[in-house]
């Protein structure tokens, strides 16, 4: 049964992706009408701040991992064959 569910998810991944994007856009859109009761700092009162913050931090993680960490942990193609 679980394999059928996974296969269904693979077959409909494009639809599921767009449904997720629509749901996230709806949540950001609702943030225009639903304001935080007590924002802890100034930027938190702007609609969609946390969504933008999450995207910015996620992209920063990708850049850090690709540009810095990858070069530290990567090995050459013949690393294991040269010994």
Image: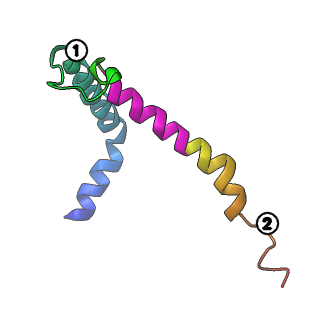
How many tags in the picture?
Answer: 2
* Image quadrant containing the N terminus: bottom left
In the picture provided, is 32 more to the left or to the right than 12? left
Q: Residue 76 carries which label?
A: 2
Counting other residues with Cα less than 10 Å from the Cα at mark 2, is it few (<14), some (14-19), or many (20 or more)? few
CB contact under 8 Å: marks 1 and 2 = no
Q: Which mark is residue 32?
A: 1
Q: In this view, does 17 lie above or below 27?
A: below
> Tag 1, which secondary structure?
helix
Residue at 27 percent across and 19 percent down: it is 45
Residue at 30 percent across and 49 percent down: it is 9
Alpha carbon of mark 1 to alpha carbon of mark 2: how far?
Answer: 50 Å
Position of residue 2 measured from the top left corner of the image (x, y, whole percent): 22, 63
**Mark toward the viewer: 1 or 2:** 1
In the picture provided, is 13 more to the left or to the right than 83? left
Position of residue 59 measured from the top left corner of the image (x, y, whole percent): 52, 37
Counting other residues with Cα less than 10 Å from the Cα at mark 1, is it few (<14), some (14-19), or many (20 or more)? few
**Residue 54 magenta-highlighted:** yes
The stretch of residues the image draws in magenta is 48-61
């Amino acid at each position: 049964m679980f394999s059928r569910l996974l296969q269904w998810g693979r077959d409909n991944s494009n639809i599921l992706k767009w449904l997720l994007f629509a749901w996230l856009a709806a949540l950001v859109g609702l943030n225009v009408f639903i304001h935080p009761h007590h924002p802890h700092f100034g930027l938190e009162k702007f609609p969609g701040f946390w969504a933008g913050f999450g995207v910015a931090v996620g992209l920063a993680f990708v850049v850090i991992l690709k540009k810095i960490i990858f070069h530290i942990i990567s090995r050459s193609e013949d690393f294991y064959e040269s010994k």
